[in-house]
């Protein structure tokens, strides 16, 4: 069944019962971009995705996992090796929050190595979901330093998940052709609501970033409710009909993820 609603950023592996949620999502027509946080988990996630139409597994290495030593050089190597052969990448990126001060070179080196691997092994239709906290400009610097990634029309679709950068960085990312996936928690802040209002309809995606805490009991139905609330809130911010938001977001998601 072709997905009728698509969560552009969630983490099945961090849910209490990922397989059950995947089954339910497929039954309800919910598509999921299952973003990985540790490249060692990708093989199992990819097998689950192949069993369920509408679910996509991304190979990722979350910067938090890199900074706190849950992942190290071997996992960066694995990320680059696997990502070179895969269309869907995420969650990857940079986090320059105060609590990670001093780790910026380590994070940049990992992202730079990933971009090298992707540039050396181009694939049509690549999608990359980006974590960028106090680092959106640095993320764009890394991608732009690899020439064909941005802004070449054949470059990957870059999705800033839960964008929280500056206004200037938002403009820069928009001009680079990036997409933005928005969730309820982003809309809980004044800046997040203003950014959601500014994001062009043809660059807008919806996400849950579920779960908020690992091993949370979550259902696909609860994901759908969250996505619906997000869509309705964005419609209010943009002063347009909710159906228009739903239609635009679905069109964008099908184009980005090539879901059927």
Image (tube, grey):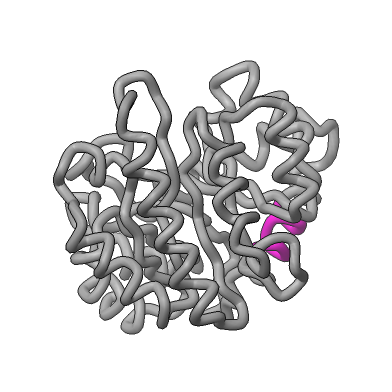
Name the spot of residue 193 as percent of width and height, x first: 66, 25
Work out whether residue 158 or residue 151 is closer to the camera in this orientation and state it: 151
Instruction: Name the residue at the right extreme.
Output: 240
Work out whether residue 67 or residue 147 is closer to the camera in this orientation and state it: 147
Residue 176 in the figure: left or right of residue 146? right
Q: Magenta span has 82? A: no
* Residue 229 makes an appearance in the image: no
Name the spot of residue 200 as percent of width and height, x first: 80, 45
Give residue 168's quadrant in the image. Answer: top right
**Magenta part of the protein: which range?**
246-253
Work out whether residue 49 or residue 35 is closer to the camera in this orientation and state it: 35
Give residue 255's quadrant in the image. Answer: bottom right
Name the spot of residue 219 as percent of width and height, x first: 32, 51
**Residue at the location (32% across, 43% down)?**
106
Residue 189 in the figure: left or right of residue 168? left
Q: How many numbered dots are placed on residues in this image?
A: 0
Q: Predominant secondary structure in magenta?
A: helix
Name the spot of residue 212 as percent of width and height, x first: 32, 36
**Residue at the location (64% across, 20% down)?**
191
**Residue at the location (39% across, 66% down)?**
58
* Residue 219 makes an appearance in the image: yes
Give residue 3's quadrant in the image. Answer: bottom right
**Residue at the location (32% across, 83% down)?**
51
Give the position of the C terminus as an image quadrant.
bottom right
């Amino acid at each position: 069944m072709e997905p009728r609603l698509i969560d552009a950023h969630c983490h099945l592996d961090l849910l209490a019962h990922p397989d059950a949620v995947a089954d339910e999502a497929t039954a309800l027509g919910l598509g999921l971009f299952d973003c990985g946080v540790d490249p060692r988990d990708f093989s199992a996630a990819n097998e689950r995705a192949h069993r369920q139409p509408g679910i996509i597994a991304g190979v990722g290495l979350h910067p938090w996992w890199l900074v706190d030593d849950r992942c190290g050089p071997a996992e960066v190597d694995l990320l680059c090796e696997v990502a070179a052969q895969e269309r869907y990448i995420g969650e990857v990126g940079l986090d320059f929050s105060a609590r990670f001060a001093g780790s910026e070179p380590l994070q940049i080196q990992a992202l730079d190595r990933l971009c090298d691997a992707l540039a050396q092994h181009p694939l049509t239709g690549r999608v990359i979901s980006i974590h960028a906290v106090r680092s959106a400009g640095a993320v764009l610097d890394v991608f732009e330093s690899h020439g064909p990634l941005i802004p070449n029309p054949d470059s990957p679709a870059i999705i800033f998940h839960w964008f929280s950068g500056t206004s200037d960085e938002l403009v820069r990312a928009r001009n680079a052709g990036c997409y933005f996936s928005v969730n309820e928690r982003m809309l809980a802040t004044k800046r997040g609501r203003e950014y959601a209002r500014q994001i062009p309809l043809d660059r807008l995606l919806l996400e849950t970033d579920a779960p908020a805490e690992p091993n949370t009991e979550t259902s696909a139905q609860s994901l759908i409710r969250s996505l619906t609330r997000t869509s309705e809130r964005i419609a209010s911010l943009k002063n347009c009909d909710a159906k228009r938001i739903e239609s635009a977001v679905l069109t964008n998601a099908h184009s980005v993820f090539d879901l059927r």
